[in-house]
Amino acid sequence: MEKIDVFIPTIKKDFNILPYTVFSLKKIDHNINQIYIVSPEDNEIIDFCKTNGIQFISETDMIPLRKEDITYSPKNINRAGWLYQQLLKLSADMVCNSEYILILDSDTVFLRKQRFISNNKIRINYSKNERHKPYLDFINRIFPNFIFFPHSFVTHHFFVEKRILIELKESINKETKLNWYSAIISNLDNNEVSSFSEYELLGNYYYNKYRKNIFFSNFKNIGVSEDCFFNKKAKIKIFSLYYNSCSIHHYNS
């Protein structure tokens, strides 16, 4: 069975969900070589990683860029941290050693068995209700000849081959004549609160470059509030439904 690494960036507000996210990795039908958690340095998360055999990575060790270096405040809303988390995810190849990497949002919990390789093809999940035109407009500024998949790849996780992640960033460098993270920042729409999606970029790169090597599946996710997630009766109801995962986003509260 294929060995994979799991890469989870997180921040303080998600620490209470993180143990459930990590525990839910038992649903992954692959051999997990290592779990990496990337976060600002914090004793609570460092102790959690030590206790659970997880590799802690300080986010400042990932890329030569800090959240404070990013100026992205559309409509006077500071979105630098939101963008920085996405840049960290696109840096997963820097620390992961396995050929396959599962990038996972720290507020997303798997509910059912998940397998991401079948018949030597990579499974890429999609969403029917997360499509956001500014994400596609961004991609079009970098890769103007891309054809877009009819649904969204914003699924709060992404299973990627390490070599493809590296290749994507090299392609961005080549197309823009900038390093990849500077290219992303330079091509944001500063009038748009959500101008970029790392998952949309990864999914459409696969769709355009490696379509014969992948297959698609509806991710069947439900967004819930923390109150709902921690309510035993509500949780039983969620688990009994057909959803593959749930995301405990703070904006659902």
Image (cartoon, rainbow, N blue to C red):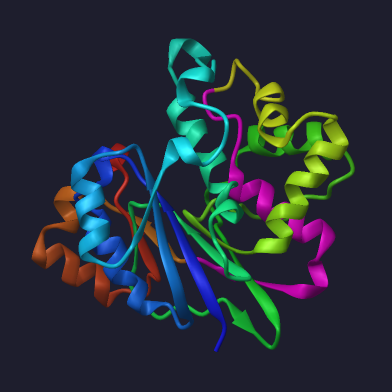
Pick the front one: 173 or 186? 173
Q: Tell me the residue at 74%/32% (across/down).
A: 179
The image quadrant where one finds the C terminus is: top left
Q: Is residue 51 above or below residue 241?
A: above
Q: Position of residue 251 (x, y in %)?
A: 31, 37
The residue stretch that appears in magenta: 193-219
Asked whether residue 180 is in view, the answer is yes
Q: Position of residue 38 (x, y in %)?
A: 40, 47
The quadrant in which residue 70 appears is: top right
Pick the front one: 217 or 174? 174
User: Residue extending furthest right?
Assistant: 145
User: Residue extending furthest left?
Assistant: 232
Q: Position of residue 182 (x, y in %)?
A: 69, 27
Q: Position of residue 26 (x, y in %)?
A: 34, 78
Q: Is residue 123 above or below residue 2?
A: above
Q: Tell me the residue at 68%/55% (across/down).
A: 165
Q: Tell me the residue at 46%/83% (across/down).
A: 29
The quadrant in which residue 48 appears is: bottom left
Q: Is residue 64 above or below residue 223?
A: above
Asked whether residue 150 is in view, the answer is no
The image quadrant where one finds the N terminus is: bottom right
Pick the front one: 16 or 150? 16
Left or right of 140, for residue 129: left
Q: Tell me the residue at 60%/70% (across/down).
A: 100
Magenta span has 251?
no
User: Residue extending furthest top?
Assistant: 76
Magenta span has 206?
yes
